[in-house]
Image (tube, rainbow, N blue to C red):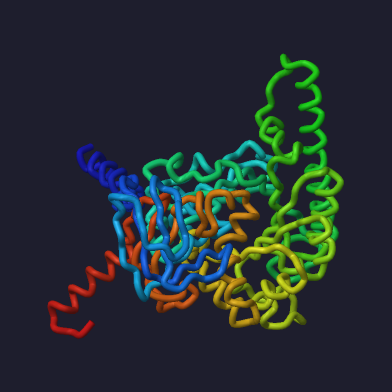
Amino acid sequence: MIGRFVCIAVFLFGSSMPVVTFASPEIPGAPQTAPIALVGGTVYPVSGPTIEGGVVLFRRGRISYVGRKRSFPAGTKVIDVSGKHVFPGLCDAYTNLGLVEVNRVRASVDHAETGQLNPNVRAQVAVNPDSELIPVTRSNGVLLAATVPTGGLMAGKSAVLQLDGWTYEDLTVKAEAGLHINWPSISPHDEWWVEGTTASRLRQSTQALKALQQAFDDARAYHRSRLADASQPTDVRWEAMRPVIEGELPVIVSANELQQIQDAVAFAVRNKVRLIIYGGYDAVHCAAALVEHEVAVIVGNVYRLPRRRDDDYDAAFTLPDRLRRAGVKFCISGSGRFGAANVRNLPYHAATAVAYGLPKEAALRAITLSPAEILGTADRVGSLAKGKDATLFVANGNPLLTATRVESAYIQGRRVVLSDRHKRLWRKYREKYRRIGQPE
């Protein structure tokens, strides 16, 4: 009995250990108590021209001045950033940050609910503010991220987060950014990993599209019924769809194939809902329709492989610039394999797009102001302008370059800790080699 008890105790203790190690020790920044002026650096407002030797002044968490003046309110803390570069916080418009910690540890993965229709699911309330991946991400200048549910046909609603805070409420910039739909593929695929016959997959896709349309029809019927008689029973799914069918909240559709994107646009027009495309591999081939109906594209993962054998090897690398030249509104997301762990690499996705034709200014905009505009948060973040949140960072160079180091960062005027798990391990093993006399 004693041996059995010891075994059980060890098992329970051991199984609890991963949960403990998933908590980040970094303490959120303290609220701003005095005005702060960043003086002498190169300022990149994004919404306007670059300012050499510029000044960014912020108080009570909001920017009060961007320009060149050198007179400040009494009590201002003046920080000399000469030779440095000041940028608005970078924003990834499609992640599962805060919902996933370790992909292979099931208990730490919480980005999908069971069932096909879950419009009432809200990613915001499931976010883990103590995720180790949040400090890692903001250390690279990514201070904002949309976190997205992914399961089923209608996955739920994403939220826009600022990456510093004690609770999910502290992190929230926008509680509901969009309703996410995974658009069924109706193109034939004969690759070895695809299950079922072409006919069976087409049948499943057709059934899914019918279920999707029925969900919108049912939601409208429900709201008409509730308007006529408020005593009708509440259905949380259809209640959650009210802002969508009334045009207040966009539908964000995951779609890469041309037929998927065209069908999604037709669906949005037919149902009179706002549409954003995520993925968008073939979006440039229906650019005219996207421009006509004001559909923006969140380019998912510039590092993708070509989807078809006869595609150019650099099709994904050149996609942002091709969308720009076609007049399609877009932003760049770093989402891809390993999800939340690689949100920190967002600026390098933009950098690859620059190497394949996208102008540098457009690339910076694609990971700052454009995602804010697409997700409806541009009144608060995305650029350095008077009245916006003081969510910004100071770096020793261009954030699109891998050698650049973020030296300080502020979220709503709070100076945030830039330590993280990677840096702690680096310091630990640097000390190991220092002790044995090895060069760093």
Q: What quarter of the picture does the C terminus occupy?
A: bottom left
Q: Residue at x 24, y 69 (%)?
A: 427
Q: Is residue 116 above or below residue 295?
A: above
* Res. 55 image quadrant: bottom left
Q: Residue at x 48, y 70 (%)?
A: 51
Q: What quarter of the picture does the N terminus occupy?
A: top left
The one of 332 and 257 positioned closer to us in this rendering? 332
* Res. 410 image quadrant: bottom left
The one of 403 and 325 positioned closer to us in this rendering? 325
The one of 170 and 231 positioned closer to us in this rendering? 170
Q: Position of residue 83 (x, y in %)?
A: 36, 76
The one of 54 and 200 positioned closer to us in this rendering? 54
Q: Residue at x 34, y 45 (%)?
A: 31
> What count of labels does the image hold?
0
Q: Is residue 110 above or below residue 90?
A: above
Q: Is residue 16 visible?
A: no
* Res. 311 image quadrant: bottom right
Q: Is residue 428 visible?
A: yes
Q: Position of residue 199 (x, y in %)?
A: 85, 59
Q: Position of residue 403 (x, y in %)?
A: 40, 79
- Left or right: residue 213 versus residue 350 is right
Q: Position of residue 293 (x, y in %)?
A: 81, 55
Q: Is residue 246 above or below residue 287?
A: above
